[in-house]
Amino acid sequence: MVKVWYNHGQEPQNELLPISSINIGDKIAQNNKNEWVISNHYRSQNENFMRQIGIRFVSKKSNVTTLSISSPDGNFRSDFYYYPKENIWFEPTHFSKKKRKGYYLFEESRILTGLTNAGSAKLSYEENGQYKDFSTIHFIPSSLPIEDYEEMIADLYRIREDIVRDDRNIARVGINLNLSKVVMELQEQLRKLKVSIKQINANPHSTLTLQTTKKKPQNHGRFDLRMEIGQYINPGIPSYRSHELKPVVTTYENMIIKQMLLDLVRYASAMGSNEITTKSLLNSLLNERDVCFRKSDLEIQRLLGSVNQVEDKETYKRVYNKLMEDMQQYLDEENSIRKDIKLYANYNKIPNTKSDTEYVELMLEMNGSFTNNNQYYHLQSNQGLDAQLKYDCRQKHLKVRNYIIKNQSKVHDGSYFGKIYLSSEHVQSHMRFYKAFCEEAQQESINQPRSITICGRVRKQPFGVDAVSTSQVNKYLDYTFDFVYISNILVDGIDIDIPSDKNSIIAFLDNELPVMMNNADQSEDSFMRLKQLEKLQSLTNQMEEIHNVSKKYDGLKEAAEELLKLNLFSKLELKGRLPIKPTQLFLHNPIYRVAWQAMQQIKYELSASLYVQQHQRQVSTVKVEYIFEVWTLYKIIHTLTKEMGWRLDRKKEVTASLDQYMVEGATVQAFQNFSVTLHWQHWELELYYEPKINLLFDTYLTPDFVFKFKRNGRTMGLVILDAKYRNYKSQGIEKWVKDINDIAINKYGNMQSIETKWKFPILASGILHSDVKISDDNEDKYNPYHVMYNETLFNTNLSNEKAHKYGSIYMIPSRTYVFKNWFRLIMEYHLNEHKVCWNCGGTEEVQERQLLTQFGYPKYYYTCQSCNEFWVKVHCRSNRHKIIKHMNNYHLQVENRRKWWVICPSCGDGRPAQQNTVTSNLFE
């Protein structure tokens, strides 16, 4: 490296400053022949020197006249400057005429080797009037591990291949199955090709070629005029030149077969067990498994001892049996309650009612979710079927308008309060009541008030003014609607339709109406432990599958290399890439026809990949943050489509932009006005990259990623992520806090566009950065999903309005599960799609199970039968704020607890008592 000192006392001429001096650093050793690998470095504009690479020709000092650096495709080139005093070449730095703190600002948009760029570049020089390529330089990020950077580039190749294969309608579930299908198809076609090649090698097709040879003079045989002339001109020499026809195997067909084998070797090498593509997949799963183990219940950690023990079949079986035994007792309790309820339930359409009942019509208005004041529950327990709902007419969530009794309409007489009960074994009454007031119905009434009319018979209140009201000491009436039978419930004038067959009614008791258990918390814990163990095993199985597939590619490579060692191919030299086209021999010779058919299938499989034509995985030298943004963009698309069930439109345009970037070397042009549309059932997601969003006063913003969510064609809101290539360890935590405040909160969280296209609520705003350590090691201090958990650092208090609105997620190839978890948060928490498995995107296989604790708190258990994901929806105990628990939580988890313990993002409920006393010191 060299350190070039510039004279900032003079104004730049032609964008160049005079050089004061150059300090020569240590020599950089070659990584391979004619290849260097060099780290880049952060540099400040407020310095009068520049550190970068220098080139010195020791043996060609006087002959080299020019030196330049260019992109792999040759589209971009920069000439080096020669400094004779030190006999050194380096790329000159271009300066503008703007100054900051006494220093002219250099142009960051130019290629600055060794500064902030990463990628590959070629060096060439001119010597004696001729240009020669002599070296390749790979610039790697200094703030990103080389493994992660290489994985990022390799991942772009794999993502491109997956999108192409998906466009061909290859049916698959997940990435692993797709990899397995491809390698099995290649193995089958290579087996067919091998049979043909063995036969061709024994008797290859050849052509006669006129060749010049040397012959000894002979007195017999065919007359050779050329030899006779040679003897006459040069008598006495031992041999003479002659021409004769000889068979050769360097035919087009044989060379095409060799070319296909070489392509297969390149592709199999890139997908093999020792290559970065495979390591990237394994590292991501390994890191996710480590996080899941770290966040698992302490009982799981105690039983396993270490996460690696899940790979031991005997250990796994022992722990699994123990957890199944723990869980079974709670299943037995729940099943016993359901069994007794079904035994004594009343399934008649119209039950017999006692004489002390009276017909009532109760008119209510519901607007939004109930609060603790409503004390709503609906359950089955050892005491039978029961429902309760309290109301306060001063609150908007639920208020009574009037009721009709004995054909007389009445309203509340002074009192605001009342109670509605349903204490009956009549199941159809409970079905109507449940459908009218369940959580889904409450959610659907938000900002869309519903008129509800309950018709049925109530128990008469003793000593009542009428059947539902009794006098109180304070002269107000106490209203109690104690239903024993509900004949109808009308919602906005439409009668709730319920089935009449017994099987459907029993299904309601089995699958919908929650059970109250004395041990509901313990049941949740036992289910959670078992599912955590199964999650660890699932990740382990995925790792094993990827490893097995990579070993198959290793075998594929070895088999192709063995065929290339045959005599037929050892004599063939490929001087350039040949186009693959049919010939008479391929179409009509039986042996060559089999080879042709196999090669066509191999070509089809390999054509989805760029590994064959760009097996070195080079990209043009650009700023590291740009590489990070491009990879992030495509990783988001890849994760949504391959793992979370979304369907991508216009796949060819998406791959075309990526090809422009990776193959053609275009950077800015490749992603101008870039957007994609994805679909999942009734949802539509528009993903924009760097859109221009106009604001007031002729200003605008260009966030990196904008997610626009539409449900059934109606836009629900925007989510914004701004990519930041950061190393907060070196740049400081203050930089992280500043990024959150300036970008996530002030810049995008409060964005007000003047365009109709962007005039929608900002559901969430955050930064997406590359620094794993800041949150991975300190999730309690720098939570990636909800930075406001750190109330002291951001000088704020938790609130329902800010819950999970501002985030700081990180993503690199070995940590992609964080984005997946964040996107699940958006869909579940902000958009209320919590009944969908956002691990795989499934809905049909999701099984819901409802329980209530002994205090009446509801619990919704969800299990995906497709991928075995498990999650629970509950409410915080203090304020009934929504809580959704996962095996890898996006709510802040208290990890040193035996229970599945999370902290409410709206009010902090669940935070350990001792933590409240040290909050001011927690985030120092």
Image: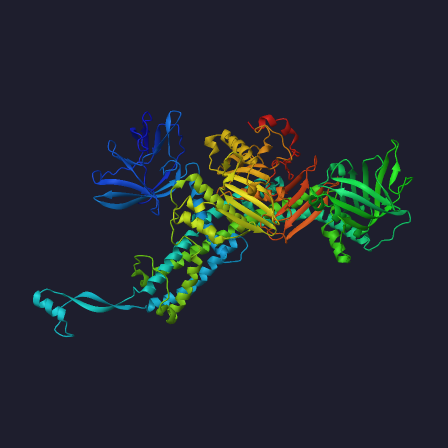
How many numbered tags mark residues here? 0
Residue 454, x across and y down, in percent? 80, 47
- Residue 525 image offset from top left, x and y in percent: 66, 42
Q: Which colour assignment does the render follow?
A: rainbow
Residue at image position (51%, 58%) is 170
In the rendering, at what x and y percent does residue 864 appear? 62, 50
* Horizontal arrangement in the rendering, residue 525 relative to residue 242 (left or right): right
Residue drawn 44% across and 55% down? Answer: 608
Left or right, residue 594 beside residue 423: left
| Residue 766 placement: quadrant | top right
Examine the rendering and report whether any part of residue 217 can be seen. no
Asked if 91 appears above or below 684 in the picture, the reply is above
Whether residue 350 sits left or right of residue 678 in the image: it is right
Quadrant containing the C terminus in the rendered view: top right
Left or right: 799, with 556 as reference point:
right
Q: Can you give x and y, in whole percent of width and height, for residue 731 in the image?
A: 46, 31
Q: Nearer the viewer, residue 571 or 467?
A: 467
Where on the picture, by quarter, is residue 374?
Answer: top right
Which part of the image, by quadrant, shows the N terminus?
top left
Residue 675 appearing in the image = yes
**Nearest to the observer: residue 776 or residue 448:** 448
Outermost front residue: 697
Residue nearest the viewer, comparing 222 with 475: 475
